[in-house]
Amino acid sequence: MSKRFGLVIDQERCIGCEACTVACKIENNSIEYWIQVETQKVTQKDTPSGQFPDLKLEWLPRLCNHCANPPCVDACPNEALVKREDGPVIYEEEKCDGCQLCISACPYNVILYIQEKNTIEKCNLCVHRIDKGLEPFCVICCEGQAIHFGDLNDPNSIVSQKIASREAFQLKTDAGTNPSVYYCPPKSRRRL
Amino acid sequence: MTENNEIKLIRTACPAHCGIDACGILAHVQGDRIIKLEPAEFPNKVDRRICLRGLSSLDITYHPDRLKYPMKRVGERGEGKFERISWDEAYEIIAEKLKEIAEKYGWRSIGWVLGGPGAGTTKFGAYLRLASLTQSTRVSAWGYGDAGLPCGSRVIFGSQFPYMYLFGKFWQRNWPELLVVWGANPGESMPLQTMRKIMDAKESGTQIVVIDPRFTVTASKADEFLGLKPGTDSALALGLMNLIFQNELHNIEFIRDHTNGPYLVRSDNGKLLRGKDIGDKKADSYIIWEENSNSPKAVRRKNVKSANITGTYDVNGIECKPAFQLLKDLAQEYPPEKVAEITGVDGNLITKLAKKLGTTDNVTFFTYMGFTRTYHGDISLRGLASVASVTGHVATSFSSGYLPAVLNWDPFLKAVPDKPSFHRLGILNLYEAVISGKPYPIKALWFAFINFLNQCVDCNKIINEFYPKLEFIVQTELFMTPSARYADLLLPVCSFLEFSDFVSHPYPYVQLQQKIIEPLYESKSDVNIVAGLAEKLGYGDYFKGGEEGMIDIITDHSSLEGYNRETLSKGAMLLRALPEGGNFPLNFRTPSRKIELYAEQLVEDDQALPVYLPPIEAPITPGENKYPLTFIQGHSRFRTHSMFANVKSLLELNPEPIVEINSIDAKARDISDNDVVTVFNDRARTTLKARISESVGPGVVNITEGWWIEQFKEGSVNHLTHDIVNPVQNKIYEPNMHMNDVAVEIIKYRGGG
């Protein structure tokens, strides 16, 4: 079977530090942040939900889901977006005319329009690294060791093992996109 | 030109003041420019790490605002007007001025204010060496927040730090059943060396309890969170001990073997009973009440096992109690309802935690400096350590793991063995020395790796009373910081990628901080700056080898044989492992050589026991203070103290200071999210944006430390803080700055003055 590279992001280990956000921007020399860390259930970043001292503070890093059925690829009239055999959805900037149909088609709001270039930007799963056998840069820079990379088609890979053992979920499964980015939810608390 | 396009990879280590995190960094260098940093490998793969600040280090190295050449002040102090001079002129001016001041007031009137060197060693050592040679004054920076914990640890464990006793085994990846993180937020301040381990432990089944006034990143990973009022930690400790004692869950064997709990204390004067008091020929021996013979005996290793740790005894007409009984009596005054009222923590939770601590075999307590930054922070640490001791959760030896590195500090601390060395002043004592000339006048100061005005207490006092008394101020800096503006001479220092140093972290590794590129502009490393000045003062020989020579000196210790510049240039090296079957004792260097639940040295201060004393300023009881809110300063992941506050890439994610205020307090003051507010007390005011957040409880407000003064609309965090000296800390070690023991009020900003 061919490879299907993907990520598993463990919310239990995410400390919301945004090292991934910073690392990605440096590695890809991007204008926008391709991976953004959302604080869940609140409007202001890094503020807990609930009432002191009964609180929750959980983060969800959002990035391109590298869907198995990527609507952005179908929507792009210029074939600027391509689904690679091994999983990553990549874009070729020179083919992009800034029409933003991909942005409308994406259910995850992770494709970014760059006004000054009239093109889009988004996570390309660091294909320049994975083609050399390296992990994406956000993976090696994650402070909490919360982001795992591997072949979702290989049952022995770290990502497959995490998915099997941790009730991992994908975002917006009803969109039929079958994302290659999975999340492990935080564990419930063992109160005293 | 093709040669220049080649990319070289060089390994170094980030010495930023997160200190023990000390990430290994692999620099990609093209020509003479660093194009990328990435986390370097460690012998153990899981230890590879970097943080968002380390990743952004090139934004410091290549920052457009870097100080580029030595400068002499031409405007008023604080105005920031300087003119360029040469290094030779700079050394000439400094040498002349220092000699002139030394002539008038003596060398000890010249002080070296050295901030936190982070994980670096020789940049700190070089200054100590010059201070030692000139017999001038070394100003210790422990007191700018980090002296409270050593004060408490010295009293109870006889050691500067409590770490090895409390969580050394945790650092060696021995996971406990229960981990209590008390008054620390490693999730932001030590994410890699500590927080990762906390999460590893949790993954393997450890239950996590976090005790903190703020619901921190660390708290977000806890199984249970106890949100207590700042500065009430020792009341909580006494409350826990009370329940532990009542339910007889304390570890009697551990108390007998390793604490001074069994030693008899005289009821008449609080002193420990000695052999001479009962006519024993061992005049100085401590005395126990031996169960079997029902009589007082000079303590021996064996008979202590049958010592009574409770009761009241008549010894030759002197009423005595074992020290443990006194602790028990004190704890009894803290039933859960009372502790709940003082601390704000639910009484049921306190009861559950006490039971858990007393019935769990393997408990680790993790703590750091934060909760000791209150007026009685030293006692807070003693309270925590007492809870750990009476339940037997303190390590007295290691049977596995890595032996700590011992650095050869002697040539720095005492450059000439048979001559006196430097004088020493705590940084809070420095205020008085400069302002009032006590214990002796300080007339010139050299600041290195410290943003003094920004990071030390009571900015207005520093500006109006402290700086004007100084005849000469030198500062080495990367940027025109708030402090740099007050220097008479400003010397450009280079970033960590431009010089070499020895890094003895993170445990269990040592690393080399290797120079990646030549210093930019005319900047120099602190070591080379010291060497240049030493030359002018006639001590050039002591600094001959430059950075590399200093590294060779500091690694010259038998424990570091084989660890040198050459071997370390290839990567981080593991420290030596304890031989199999080995035992590394963790001694207690207290007067009794035991864990001192009872500190005889503090009887006159009424602090022999870890008593609860309310904070000096923080308003614990509502309505009794005209400033009803407690102001605390957490740490931010976007800065290491005041470093990185001017880095654009991080400011994009975290643009400006905010004050976190609970919804109840905000509502009472008609404050909405994002409103501009003024935080004030009698000393000063600061104006910034409000963030309504449940991360702090009612009555507490938080502004993360490290923002530069000019980043506030007015004032800053340390405009609000005070320089009150705790005399007991002064006696034990040196006084701490109590940044988390400050009272304030908040109102909506009204504009103007």
Image (tube, coloured by chain):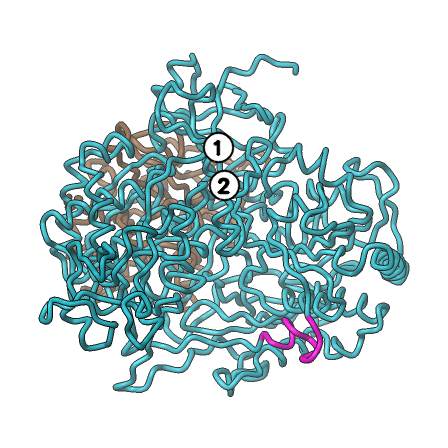
Chain colours: A brown, B cyan
Q: Are marks 1 and 2 in contact (CB under 8 Å)?
A: yes
In the depicted view, which residue is nearer to us: B218 or B46? B218
> Which residue in the protein does label 1 denote?
B742
Residue B657: in magenta span: no
In this rendering, position of residue B340 left or right of residue A36: left
Whether residue A179 is visible, yes or no, is no
User: Which secondary structure dominates the residues rendered in magenta?
Assistant: loop
Which class describes the residues within 10 Å of circle 1: few (<14), some (14-19), or many (20+)? many
> Which residue in the protein does label 2 denote?
B738
Residue B148 coordinates in the image, percent (x, y): 46, 50
Secondary structure, mark 1, is strand
* Quarter of the image where the N terminus of chain B is located: bottom right
The residue most toward the front is: B317
Amino acid found under the numbered disc labelled 1: Val
Residue B494, picture quadrant: bottom right
Residue A23 coordinates in the image, percent (x, y): 48, 52
In the depicted view, which residue is nearer to us: B412 or A56? B412
Amino acid found under the numbered disc labelled 2: His
Secondary structure, mark 2, is loop
Residue range (magenta): B409-420
In this rendering, position of residue B246 left or right of residue A171: left
Residue A95 coordinates in the image, percent (x, y): 50, 45
In the depicted view, which residue is nearer to us: B272 or B376? B272
Residue B415: in magenta span: yes
In this rendering, position of residue B515 left or right of residue B670: right
Q: Chain of mark 2?
A: B
